[in-house]
């Protein structure tokens, strides 16, 4: 997009310099510039490479001026678009420099870095709660229907007066990520429902996800993410995961 705008901008001065001086009979002279002096129009003709003049009564000045103004407006708009894009690129580079390269979740609040701590999760089934650490033990841990939970009914990471917060997520490795809506219960927040499928020996996950926008900021797994719609007050988490592998990394927050 930027390259296209630059090409347009480079071409427009050539068009603006070559003015079509329209005649009332529909023809025109291609001129570099023109001046109206009383009842005469003096112009530099690109056809003869010299100054010439003719009666103003033969010139369609309104059409000439309208087209010249339109060309200038297009040039000004293209120049502003390039300026805005360059400003946005500078701002993005400045943001990237403030984000650590260590995997994790971050925010910039009033130009200050906020670091979110990763939170542990547990699997809860009819036999109680067990820490989710040993991937090979998943069938025994989940055993039918379970829930993935984190401790506490409310996150300590409060986000005030902002319902579409922006986050910077530095991935540990190339994986999926999303914002989950959490379901508070007594003493815990449910991250997602889990169902173990014995025949396939797979885990079916049922999170409640939030639609997000994402922008890749670097080639080493740094993303900027933010909700597409305003978030309601409540409990949420940014989750990095591989579907059906139960290897979630969770960073919780609360919208106040």
Image (cartoon, rainbow, N blue to C red):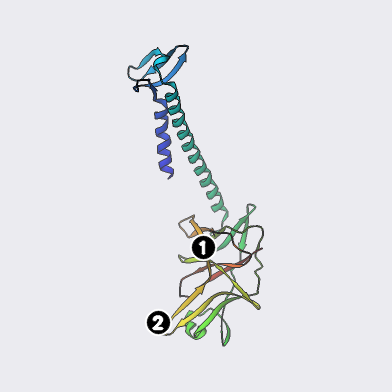
Residue 200 numbered tag: 2
Tell me the CA gap for discs 1 and 2.
29 Å
Using a 10 Å C-alpha cutoff, classify the residue at mark 2 as few (fewer than 14 neighbours), some (14 to 19) or many (20 or more). few
Q: Is residue 102 left or right of residue 53?
A: right
Q: Residue at x 49, y 40 (%)?
A: 81
Q: Residue at x 50, y 58 (%)?
A: 214
Residue 140: x %, y % from top left: 49, 86
Q: Quadrant of the C terminus?
A: bottom right
Q: Residue at x 63, y 52 (%)?
A: 111
Tell me if I can see residue 172 in this picture: no
Residue 236: x %, y % from top left: 59, 67
**On screen, residue 42 above or below 125:** above
Place residue 5 in its image quadrant: top left
Q: Secondary structure at mark 1?
A: loop
Q: Nearer the viewer, residue 185 or 237?
A: 185
Tell me if I can see residue 79 in this picture: yes
Residue 210: x %, y % from top left: 53, 65
Q: Is residue 224 left or right of residue 64?
A: right
Residue 150 numbered tag: none
Using a 10 Å C-alpha cutoff, classify the residue at mark 1 as few (fewer than 14 neighbours), some (14 to 19) or many (20 or more). few
Residue 72: x %, y % from top left: 46, 30
For marks 1 and 2, give the one nearer the viewer.
Answer: 1
Place residue 12 in its image quadrant: top left
Q: Are marks 1 and 2 in contact (CB under 8 Å)?
A: no
Q: Is residue 254 left or right of residue 221?
A: right
Q: Secondary structure at mark 2?
A: loop
Q: Quadrant of the N terminus?
A: top left
Q: Nearer the viewer, residue 211 or 128?
A: 211
Q: How many marks?
A: 2
Q: Nearer the viewer, residue 151 or 228?
A: 228
Q: Which of the marked residues, 1 or 2, is nearer the chain's N terminus?
A: 2
Residue 211 numbered tag: 1
């Amino acid at each position: 997009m930027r390259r296209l705008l630059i090409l347009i901008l480079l071409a427009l001065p050539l068009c603006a310099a070559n003015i079509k001086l329209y005649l009332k009979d529909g023809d025109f002279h291609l001129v570099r510039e023109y001046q109206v002096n009383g009842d005469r129009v003096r112009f530099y003709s690109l056809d003869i490479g010299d100054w010439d003049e003719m009666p103003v009564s033969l010139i369609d000045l309104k059409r000439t001026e309208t087209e010249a103004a339109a060309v200038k407006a297009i040039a000004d708009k293209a120049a502003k678009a390039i300026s805005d894009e360059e400003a946005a690129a500078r701002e993005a580079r400045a943001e990237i420099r403030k984000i650590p390269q260590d995997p994790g979740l971050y925010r910039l609040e009033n130009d200050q870095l906020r670091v979110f701590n990763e939170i542990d999760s547990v699997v809860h089934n009819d036999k109680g709660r067990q820490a989710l650490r040993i991937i090979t033990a998943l069938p025994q841990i989940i055993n039918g229907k379970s829930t993935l939970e984190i401790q506490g009914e409310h996150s300590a990471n409060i986000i005030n007066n902002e319902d579409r917060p922006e986050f910077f997520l530095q991935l540990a490795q190339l994986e999926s990520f999303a914002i989950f809506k959490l379901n508070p219960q007594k003493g815990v927040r449910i991250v997602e429902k889990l169902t173990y499928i014995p025949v396939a020996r797979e885990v079916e996950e049922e999170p409640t996800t939030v639609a997000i926008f994402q922008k890749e900021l670097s080639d080493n797994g740094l993303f900027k993410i933010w909700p597409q719609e305003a978030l309601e007050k409540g409990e949420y988490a940014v989750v990095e995961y591989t579907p059906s592998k139960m290897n979630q990394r969770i960073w919780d927050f609360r919208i106040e």
